[in-house]
Amino acid sequence: MTRFASSYLTIPIPALKKAGRRVCAIAGLAAIVSLAACTTEQQAQVAPPPPVAQPPAAHQLAGEQPGFLRLPNSAPNQVPVRVGILLPFSNGSPGTRKLATAMMNAAEMALYDAGNKNIILMAADEGGGPGEAATAAQKLLDQGAEIILGPLFSQSVAAVAPIARDRGVPVIAFSTNRDVAGNGIYLLSFQPENDVKRVLAYAAAQGHSKFAALVPQNPYGDHVAAAFNQDVPADSGAVADLERFSSDTGDVVTQAAAIAKTTPDALLVAQGGQLLRGIAPTLAYDGLDNSHVQLLGTGVWDDSAILNEPALVGGWFAAPQPDADSTFDTHYQADFSTMPPQLSTLAYDAVSLVALLANGQPYHRFTAAALTDPNGFAGVTGIFRFTADGACERGLAILSVGADGFNVVSPAPTTFQHVGS
């Protein structure tokens, strides 16, 4: 692809080399302990000199620094908008590397569409672990990044966070794990908490009040379970039961029987795909199909693999408005001759958001107030906004499972003003 002018795009990916994926922390700790022991013994014999006051380090956002990246044709009196993007280009998984490339493509596409030639997009490799991500983030900050987009994985976000905070630079990461958000770290991702909140609120508005949940025993399930326990009471409902099952086997015989005894009027099943189709007959056997109990789902139900399963017909789930990203898909396919993965929309939205805020005062463009604008922003798949704790709230639709497809029963909101169910 040749349309991206090199005057405002710098992607030094070919020059990246894979560093060691793990740091031997035990050896480093042993050395520190040994050094501390020597220092203590010496202090017992000779009093140390008084400490010499050191001037505070210059803050990253104080102004231009000699090491900050500048392109040859940039005006000397103009401060470019330096944007770091951190993705796992050299990850050990071929699928992950392919996703990283697609997200970078989407970021380039958004940069071109924005038409702001004062933005410099500086790419770095998240690599295969937190250590590589931290090193790459440090490089981006040394080059003058005012904001960092990425990384993708929560462990890398946790490693990058203290480095970015020390420079006063916000991070818009792509992880779904809210545990790593907050204090300057914002997660632009599809988070299960949004799905749970939306579908439970809709079900409550339709008169359902006694809720049960069937949730896998994995990190995704942990987040769904926490949101379920929080949101049901918030919607004036009662938690009848919450059962966990193995996501490896999908065996829910015991769990389904236990839920049936609590007689809920709505059941949230946080599983999708072929495994959900396998679970559905067990639910129906215990009287937990849609003819007896309203089935509810999360965004993982947005998969044609669950269609034509009679026990699921009529179930409701939360997801982006259907075909909301069709224009993006067409655009991407025309530019890169392939269909994009869904997560590539996150990189497009992140760069588009940066471009929207880029006209502010240099080093003060991406403030917490600007990023957490309560009115939110329009993204590829719908509206979104960052909350004070760094999570991402999204405007989602409610879809119903039909025999031949999904039907919208409650459209996604187009504004965060007076959002209801």
Image: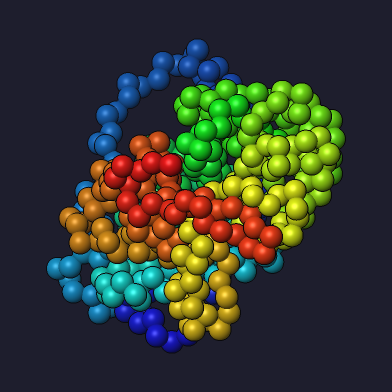
Using the image as rendered, state which of residue 392 and residue 75 is in the foreground: 392
Residue at the far left in the pictured view: 77
Name the quarter where the C terminus is drawn.
top left
Task: Tell me which residue sits at (71%, 56%) in the image.
Answer: 306
State the count of labels.
0
Relative side of 186 to 16, left or right: left
Answer yes or no: is residue 129 visible.
Answer: no
Answer yes or no: is residue 384 visible.
Answer: yes
Relative side of 385 to 79, left or right: right
Using the image as rendered, state which of residue 350 and residue 147 is in the foreground: 350
Whole-percent x, y for residue 102 in the image: 54, 70
> Image quarter for residue 261?
top right
Whole-percent x, y for residue 193 in the image: 53, 40
Residue at the far top in the pictured view: 44
Task: Tell me which residue sits at (56%, 71%) in the image.
Answer: 340
> Image quarter for residue 387?
top left
Relative side of 252 to 32, left or right: right
Task: Tell me which residue sits at (68%, 37%) in the image.
Answer: 293
Vertical placement of residue 347 versus 48, above or below: below
Whole-percent x, y for residue 353 in the image: 33, 59
Residue at the far front in the pictured view: 291
Vertical placement of residue 59 versus 99, above or below: above
Whole-percent x, y for residue 339 in the image: 57, 75
Using the image as rendered, state which of residue 85 and residue 179 is in the foreground: 179
Vertical placement of residue 307 versus 283, above or below: below
How is the protein colored in the picture? rainbow
Using the image as rendered, state which of residue 203 and residue 252 is in the foreground: 203
Relative side of 90 to 322, left or right: right
Task: Tell me which residue sits at (35%, 37%) in the image.
Answer: 388
